[in-house]
Structure formats: C-alpha cells, structure tokens
Amino acid sequence: MSGIKNISALVKGMTPKLNEGTYVFSSVKDATAIPRASILCEFKEAEGTTIIIDKNKADTLNLSYEYEAAWITLTIHSSLEAVGLTALFANELAKHNISCNVIAAYYHDHIFVAVKDAESAMEALTNLAQNYTD
C-alpha cells in the first residue's frame, strides 16, 4: 500500500504520538558490536555509524551521547514522495523554538525533539493538524 501524498490530508491526519522512553544519538565505529534488537535506527556516515537507541540501553552499553530526545511518530501513512510535510511541521516547531531531527521511514515520519520540548512539540503538532487550512 503506497502512502498518502496529498499535503492537506497528511497534515490534517498526521496525529502525533509521543512514544515512551528517552532516546539518544550515538556515533559508533562498529555497530555490529551492539545487539541489533537494541538499535532503533542507524545511518552510516564516513565518520562512523550514527545509531538511535534507548538511553537506558546506551548507558548499559557505555555509549557516549550528548543529546537526549523524545520520539514522536506521525501516525498517518505518508508517502516517501510526499512534498511539503516535513517543511510544514519543522517550520511550526521552529516557531516555538523547538529543534527537530526527522526520520522518514516507509510508513511514518518520526520526529526526535529534546526531552524538555516533548510536550510543547506535541501541542504545536496537534494544533497544526487541527487548524491547518489549504
């Protein structure tokens, strides 16, 4: 099933969900040394592999990190070819001085914000969805 491309339908139906836990971004030289089931996401860069992992697991594995994040999922099935959704919600969060790190997965967009900004981000995203006009 392909995802939704219509920007109006995406924004109005994005229904943000705050996932439980605190997540961290860590750069590792060898991601194979970490149990695959522990890693939420990974991305290979020239300098190392960035992993997103639950903070408690990172602490247990003695991984270094600087950023503690809350994970918000937009529960609508967005198409990877949809245009404008990321720009709209990133701009809305920026209006509230909230930085975001976005991962577009096959079914949903996932937004990581500083833990201290989680509730404000949820409010801003919910308001955007409820008040969006074309």
Image (cartoon, rainbow, N blue to C red):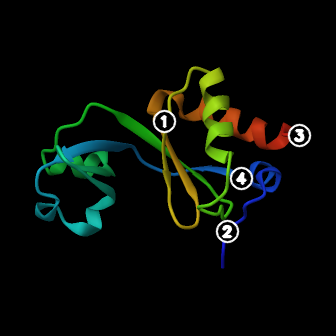
Q: Amino acid at mark 2?
A: Gly
CA gap between label 3 and label 2 equals 21 Å
Residue 66 drawn above or below residue 38:
above
Secondary structure beneath disc 4?
loop
User: Mark 3, mark 4: which one is toward the viewer?
Assistant: 3
CA gap between label 4 and label 1 equals 17 Å
Circle nearer the N terminus (1, 3): 1
At which x and y percent is residue 71? 48, 46
Secondary structure beneath disc 2?
loop
Dot 3 corresponds to which residue?
133
Choose top left, top right, bottom left or bottom right for residue 120: top right
Dot 4 corresponds to which residue?
14
Q: Amino acid at mark 1?
A: Val
Dot 2 corresponds to which residue?
3
Q: Amino acid at mark 3?
A: Thr
Circle nearer the N terminus (3, 2): 2
Secondary structure beneath disc 3?
loop
* Most foreground residue, 91 or 12: 91
Determine the residue positioned at 72% across, 64% down. Answer: 4
Quarter placement of the C terminus: top right
Q: Amino acid at mark 4?
A: Met
CA gap between label 4 and label 2 equals 12 Å
Residue 101 lies left or right of residue 50; in this view the side is right
Determine the residue positioned at 67% across, 30% down. Answer: 92
Quarter placement of the N terminus: bottom right
Q: Callout 4 environment at 10 Å: few (<14), some (14 to 19), or many (20+)? A: many
At which x and y percent is residue 34? 16, 61
Residue 12 drawn above or below residue 34:
above
Residue 129 drawn above or below residue 97:
below
At which x and y percent is residue 27? 20, 44
